[in-house]
Amino acid sequence: MREAAAAEEFEVVDSTLMKRVFYVFAALALLSVAISLGGKWLGRSIAMAGYTDDTTVRQVVMGNNVISVPANFIRFDQARRDGIASRFDLYLRYPEMDGYSTAARDDFNHVTTRKIIFLSFEPRMMSRDMSGRFAPIYSALIVTPGTPGPGGTRLYGFTEKSGYLNEVLAVAERPGKDPFVARCLSGPTAEDSLAPCERDIQVGDDLSLTYRFPRELLGNWQALDAAIATKVAGILKTGR
């Protein structure tokens, strides 16, 4: 009887042990699969470094405006969705005017010549854009006569009381229109910046667009400004 009972107890223990071993191996197998999948996801996430090659078109509403762009144009991950925004940030490659892709990886990582443009849409806060502010505001804050700049521009330093430290104003005449105007960082600060020049223009229904660009593109300001205007016209629609 004792032998039979012992054998029966051994079978119960053995069965329990086998079940535990089975569960342990099953858990390890599931953990292995999870690690493998997680590793692949994390590896791609690290490789993308915050970029996306997703070309799904997102529609963002700002006031009476709708901006429709592929997700790979949108600078920040949390903004890559449909909805309402008070500010909308994009980045594009110039002169292609396209978003991130595997083929454009080196350009977006600034391995090659600097050619990425950063665009920010916001509600209009001033009645005049940068060109319109030259005569009433900037002209009183610069040191004349200035020096010749790239692409027919003229570069002006700012007075000490202007508040624009380590910046210069690039101005180019445009027949029949307000001048082209952009502010650019100068000195060591400019060397460390990927896009040290900026310009704002009025677009859509009460929106302001500020675009920042590499100083190397200043000499091609006419084509750059036209490319920005064309791209905005294609992605921005108003309710009026």
Image (cartoon, rainbow, N blue to C red):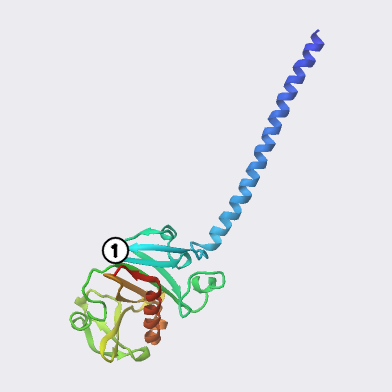
Q: Is residue 45 above or below residue 94?
A: above
The mark tally for this picture is 1
Quadrant housing the C terminus: bottom left
> In this image, 10 relative to 113: left or right?
right
Q: Nearer the viewer, residue 5 or 119?
A: 119
Can you see residue 98?
A: yes
Would you call the spot at circle 1 few (<14 residues within 10 Å), some (14-19), or many (20 or more)? Answer: some
Where on the picture, by quarter, is residue 207?
bottom left
- Residue 57: x and y in percent read 46, 65
Can you see residue 195?
A: no
- Residue 223: x and y in percent read 40, 85
> In this image, 51 relative to 126: left or right?
right
Q: Nearer the viewer, residue 65 or 38?
A: 65
- Residue 120: x and y in percent read 35, 69
Residue occupying image coordinates x 41% and y 67%:
68
Say which element carries label 1: loop
Q: Is residue 179 above or below residue 45?
A: below
Residue occupying image coordinates x 48% and y 71%:
99
Q: Nearer the viewer, residue 182 or 53?
A: 53
Where on the picture, by quarter, is residue 172?
bottom left
Quadrant housing the N terminus: top right
Q: Residue furthest front?
A: 240
Residue occupying image coordinates x 22% and y 71%:
126
As shown in the figure, which amino acid type bears the numbered disc 1? Gly
- Residue 37: x and y in percent read 61, 51
Residue occupying image coordinates x 68% and y 37%:
26
Q: Is residue 179 above or below residue 16?
A: below
Task: Identify the residue position indicated by label 1 in the image.
Answer: 63
Q: Nearer the viewer, residue 80 or 230?
A: 230
> In this image, 41 relative to 235: left or right?
right
